[in-house]
Amino acid sequence: MIDRSQFNAEDFLVDNTFQLYCSGTDQLCTDYWEKYIKTHPEQENVIMEAKRLFIILSGNKRPLNHQFDTFKKDFNSDKPLKVYKNYTWLKIAAAIILIAGIAFLYRNYSLDKTVHTELKAQVFSTKGGERKKVSLPDGSVVLLNAKSSLSIGADFNDKLREVKLTGEAFFDVVHNKDKPFKVHTEDFEINVLGTAFNVKAYADENTSEATLIRGLITMEAVSGNGGMITLKPSQKVTFYKIAPVQENQKVLKSTPGHPEITINHYTLIKDSSIVETAWTKGKIEIYDQDFAEIKGALEKWFDVKIHFTNPGIEKYRFTATFSHETLEEALKALQNVENFKYEIKGNEVTISK
């Protein structure tokens, strides 16, 4: 029994029973193919394409097989062969060659189109105030935060799965032990097999960080300082471009002239929300952070630039949650905690005492 489940348009075209079905000259073939289409709806588009090509090639005339059979009958008969002025046999030969040619071009065009699609390098980016979901060829999913960029090479998912990130993204990576997943940032590289984690690596911020939600990842600073770091679920690594003044953190590397690397746990608040990944759910979670720390998040979320007129304002500390609020509503809410003034001109925001 012929397995037609993988047939394409040209495969159907060369099937004798399919030709009879298209021409409508054989009731048994017609009944068979009508039943086949009903029981194989997933192939309906391919079959309709093959039928369309048959109609084009046959020019809505008698079936090619019928013409060919008539020709053979006349050729083998004892009657003198009558030569028609319309050269029917040449038309038959030309039609057969045309079918083969179109089938060849159709197949090669489809293959060529697929190859170019798979090998195309891509860059996904977001503007201020924008977030985007990206589905990778291997089935992994990436959520891009505002003002971020994700680059995928043409050889992605060939032997390796490598991407380059500038900004912030949440990765949910499909497990494949034969094709490790690697994230390159300006400050560090992350090696993954299959896991979910958040990476924040904005060039204009003083820190870069990676937060592991599920699975296992290893990290290494691009500079080579700090060695290999292995993260477990709920842990967060922070790379400080400027030496921090922090407490209750485990310092993995502290060398004069080099960034510090610290490790602790992600911030979990009362409703089980994770501060570091709240943006993936359309929220900004601020938990006991000063104005200087949340400045970058507010700028990217609302697509503005914030300026402080007094260094003391930067030390004001806040705990808050924002989701659908406007910039002005958010600033007014923060004013209920600390006394400051603000002025909004276009996308420029000035904060003063």
Image (cartoon, rainbow, N blue to C red):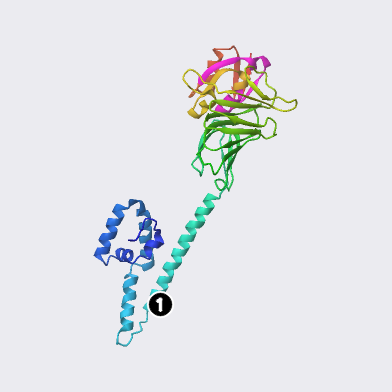
Q: Could you tell me if residue 130 is visible in this image?
A: no
Q: Could you tell me if residue 92 is visible in this image?
A: yes
The residue at 46%/60% (across/down) is 107
Mark 1 = which residue?
90
Query: Left or right: 194 with respect to 25?
Result: right
Residue 241, position as x, y percentages in the image: 68, 27
Looking at the image, which residue sits at the far right? 256
Query: Left or right: 138 with respect to 5?
Result: right
Q: Label 1 neighbourhood size at 10 Å, few (<14), some (14-19), many (20+)?
A: few
Residue 91, position as x, y percentages in the image: 39, 75
Nearer to us in this view, 331 or 43: 43
Task: Give the quadrant of the N terminus.
Answer: bottom left
Task: Give the quadrant of the C terminus.
Answer: top right
Asked if residue 314 is among those painted magenta in the image, a careful observer would answer yes
Range drawn in magenta: 295-321
Q: Residue flagged by tag 1: what amino acid is it? A: Leu
**Picture quadrant where residue 297 is located:** top right
Q: In this view, does 118 lie above or below 269?
A: below
Q: Is residue 48 above or below residue 25?
A: above
Query: Left or right: 272 with respect to 85?
Result: right
Asked if residue 72 is among those painted magenta in the image, a careful observer would answer no
Q: In this view, does 8 lie above or below 234?
A: below
The residue at 35%/51% (across/down) is 42
Residue 73, position as x, y percentages in the image: 30, 80
The residue at 37%/77% (across/down) is 88
Q: Please give the count of numbered marks on the rendered protein.
A: 1
The residue at 54%/25% (across/down) is 234
* Circle 1: element type: helix
